[in-house]
Amino acid sequence: MTYIDKIPQATVVDLKQLIDLADGEVTSRTLVQRPDLTLTLFAVGTGEEIGGHEAAGDAMVNVLSGVAEITIADQAYMVAAGQTIVIPAGQRHSLYAKEGFQMLLTVVKPAQS
């Protein structure tokens, strides 16, 4: 059985090559979508924003390129390529592209009974 079927397996992959970064756009590509786990690539053009929202699980943002300003409960963090931040479940947050960025978002939610 294959659990991650949106990218080639047993192959070295540069995740940045799987999603295009373009000014004026926010794009996403889902790699895994399960009730307890999602893996999604995002590309956010310079000056674009993913507005305030909350997630049901812990959200780990791994910035692949560029610079994101990530605000969690009114505290802003600059997260650059190669850096990661975890957003606690239920915390209101937003993401702003100080410099166009690509990221891998992993959301881990409570197991469903």
Image (spheres, rainbow, N blue to C red):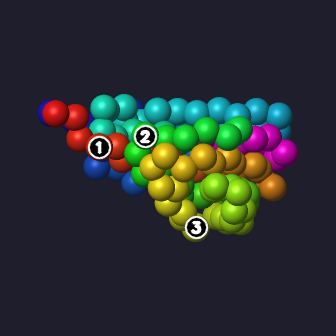
**Disc nearer the start of the sequence (1/2):** 2
Q: Position of residue 113 (x, y in %)?
A: 16, 33
Query: Residue flagged by tag 1: what amino acid is it?
Result: Pro
* Residue identified by numbered label 1: 110
Q: Position of residue 110 (x, y in %)?
A: 29, 43
In this view, the mark in front (2 or 3): 2
Location of residue 59 with respect to 80 vertically, above or below: above
User: Residue at 67% of width from left, 40% of height from top?
Assistant: 52
Q: CA distance from mark 3 to mark 1?
A: 27 Å
Horizontal relation, residue 78 to residue 38: left or right: right
The quarter of the rendered structure image containing the N terminus is top left
**Disc nearer the start of the sequence (2/3):** 2
Which segment did they paint magenta?
A: 42-49
Judge whether residue 45 is colored magenta. yes
* Of the pair 48 and 13, the residue shown nearer to us: 48
* Residue identified by numbered label 3: 82
Query: Residue flagged by tag 2: what amino acid is it?
Result: Ala
Horizontal relation, residue 100 to residue 52: left or right: right
User: Residue at 43% of width from left, 40% of height from top?
Assistant: 56
Q: Are marks 1 and 2 in contact (CB under 8 Å)?
A: yes
Q: Position of residue 95 (x, y in %)?
A: 69, 48
Residue 37 seen in this snapshot: yes
